[in-house]
Image: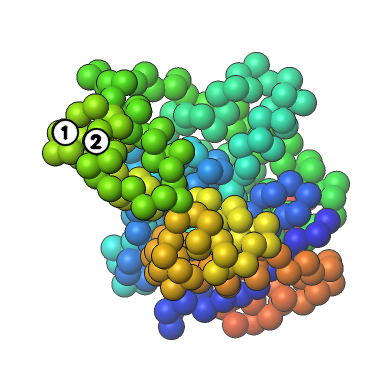
Amino acid sequence: MHSAAVNRPTRSDDWIHIRRDHDTGIESVHAHFRGHAYDPHDHDEVLVGVTQQGIQQFRCHRIVHRSTAGRVILIEPGAVHDGDAPEDVGFTYAMLYLPQRWLAGMAGRLELPNASGIGAAFRNTVAIDDGLREIIQNAFLALHGNEARLARDQCLDELVRRLSAQAGELALPEAGSTDQLLRARDFLHDRMAGDIGLDELARHSGMDRFRLTRQFKRRFGQSPHAYLVRLRLRAARALLAGGGEPNQVALDVGFADQSHLGRWFQRAYRLSPAAYQRECTNVLDRHAGRAEDERHRSVTGAVDVRHQGGAYRPR
């Protein structure tokens, strides 16, 4: 199994450790933040994780959630969320970013009855579920700790099966949503890299700019500009993980230059584009990956991979 991992400091008391599994495309993120963690953003992947310490507060689906140690976090692709620590001690979490294509393929191979609904909508954003928590932690540590392929595969199979039980019903479009708003949204997707003005967007949608701004935010949860930045960040993240040069990626997705991309990227993900790319593209062998984990533990005490009764558990 090939994966990439680098420890990268942020603020003096914050840290973040990302590993990307090259076989599945799954990213495992282990991080600690105090104060403001990150601005509103979203992901193409399904996010499943566990709060390990402190209070992890975030807004998602227009609700403020507070996850404490041992609680499970489940976030669908495209769900805008932020993050902050309401207490001085901060919070620590472990998170898996599951690609939608991989998850759908696994659900189909496992012949799960509600395969199409896994990750599309969850019944709860924050859940108290000891069984699911243990399964997520085992899968996280199998990937993050560079465990053998068999251990990883078994943990991931179990995770997908358990997630199928968390699938909720897809929400119907809000009352009053119009073809005009959908045209505006699609125009932003199609012209993501362009310098789109509000008047141009309003003309394309067929409504005046003031009504468009107000109704767009009500329908999609963000202003047209915030929505466009979110699209660009998601595209940039994928291109960087694929090895694209940060300066060219910035231009390709519509930012003015690399520094412009860097400012927005840092606010959303707490890493510079170059640092994120290094973490996703440096291929480490198993021994080097474990040596990196030992160095990480010696500095932060954050990861403690040990065998207890047949399962890998965090300290």
Q: Residue at x 73, y 55 (%)?
A: 21
For mark 1, give the secondary structure.
loop
Q: What quarter of the picture does the C terminus occupy?
A: bottom right
Q: For this view, does 59 lie left or right of residue 234? A: left
Q: Is residue 39 above or below residue 199?
A: below
Q: Position of residue 25 (x, y in %)?
A: 69, 49
Q: Residue at x 72, y 32 (%)?
A: 106
For mark 2, give the secondary structure.
helix
Disc number at residue 208? 1
- Depth order, front residue of 184/314: 184
Q: Amino acid at mark 1?
A: Asp
Q: Please indicate, yes or no, whether residue 191 appears anywhere in the rendered image.
A: yes
When asked about the image quadrant of residue 207, the answer is top left
**Is the residue under label 1 in contact with that under label 2 (CB below 8 Å)?**
yes
Q: What quarter of the picture does the N terminus occupy?
A: bottom right
Q: Please indicate, yes or no, whether residue 62 appears anywhere in the rendered image.
A: no
Q: Amino acid at mark 2?
A: Ala
- Depth order, front residue of 220/258: 258
Q: Residue at x 44, y 39 (%)?
A: 189
- Depth order, front residue of 184/275: 184
The residue carrying mark 2 is 202
Real-space Cα distance between discs 2 and 1? 6 Å
Q: Position of residue 211 (x, y in %)?
A: 15, 33
Q: Position of residue 92 (x, y in %)?
A: 47, 63
Q: Residues within 10 Å of mark 2 (few under 14, many from 20)?
A: many
